[in-house]
Image (cartoon, grey):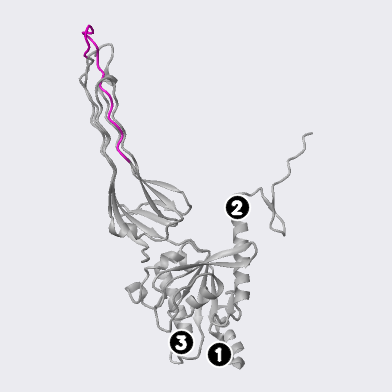
Amino acid sequence: MKFVDEAKIEVMAGKGGNGVASFRREKFIPKGGPDGGDGGRGGSIYAIADRNLNTLIDYRYTRKFQAKNGENGRGSDCYGRGAPDIELRVPVGTVITDINTGETIADLDKNGEKALLARGGKGGLGNLHFKSSTNRAPRQCTPGEPGEERALKLELRVLADVGLLGLPNAGKSTLISAVSNAKPRIADYPFTTLHPHLGVVRAGPESSFVIADIPGLIEGASEGAGLGHQFLRHLSRTSLLLHVIDVAPMHAEEDPIAAAKAIVEELRKFDPALADKPRWVVLNKMDLVPEEERAEVIEKYRKEFGADTPLFAISAATREGTDKLVNAIAADIHEQRRQLLAESEPDVCFDDQEEVFPPEPEEEK
């Protein structure tokens, strides 16, 4: 199935039904009084996050969604029936934005999360609402309110803990296939990966994280080179970036360090917050570097990126060094989760066995 991570749609909620001006007409009741009912509510349109979906392909071809109008009120105190709502199911991780105002309407990052896209109009009032001691035969009624109309942009941002960043053919797809259950296409030409891949990495019996592989980024992507910034949004939810660099001495005319720094600059052009995320350097294809030169290569990159930047030398093809990388990532993500939980629940205590114990209540004196 084709991967679609962006779509534009129009939603039109239903109009509320009109209220009615009516009077009770029955034999032997000459002054029955007003009995006009209210109009029904127009149908609203909602979006619901569904974990069983992983693409916005349904909204690439069907772009307009219109809810039904509410029924008009009737006599004999009969209210109009409200119109049914429309529920649009979207993948978990979908961000919905109003095209005209730029306002973010919803960020559906949990399964089952629901957001109102367009509210149906209220029904109009029948004349029974206008009766009083001084107005016993009101002929007023109000029309139903129009429903909301919006032009919306749906943007899927995959949910992952770790994102892979790097040039085409740096070995990102090989790495994700080596450490996770993902099976992306792997070939010896650029831009083999045409859409994001997610893989679940098991670092232990009760320790796992999700890793995302996106198409390679090249210098000039902000001007549309390569696949541009089309898929960088998928890294926005990650808590850690792995910058994969090809260190194989097969292209001596290229400077991999300059290319790597250019990629970081492209990342900053796209989103400074994304560029400021924790980023580790992964030197891939070390099996192609002569053994006597490996220490020198590692030291060279360590000087360029600084001693504070975690650096790992691996070979995704032979899986050399991947276990050490996976364990380090798992420990880092676990620590981040502990900190988030501690910030959200400051009264919760942790011990070394990762068990959570609530504070004991004080004894009453």
**Mark identifier at residue 289:** 1
**If you read the primary sequence from the N terminus, does the residue marked by circle 2 or circle 3 appear first?**
3
Which quadrant holds the C terminus?
top right
Tag 2 secondary structure: helix
Q: Amino acid at mark 1?
A: Val
**Image-based side of 292 in relation to 244, left or right:** right
**Residue that carries the numbered disc 3 in the rendered image:** 255
Q: Main secondary structure of the magenta part?
A: loop
Q: Position of residue 242 (x, y in %)?
A: 52, 72
Question: Is residue 220 or residue 63 the one in the foreground?
Answer: 63
Tag 1 secondary structure: loop
Q: Position of residue 340 (x, y in %)?
A: 59, 55
Q: Amino acid at mark 3?
A: Asp
Measure the C-alpha gap from mark 2 to mark 1: 45 Å
Measure the C-alpha gap from mark 2 to mark 3: 43 Å
- The residue stretch that appears in magenta: 25-43
- Residue at horizontal 21%, vertical 14%? 25
Q: Quadrant of residue 333?
A: bottom right
Q: Is residue 196 above or below residue 127?
A: below
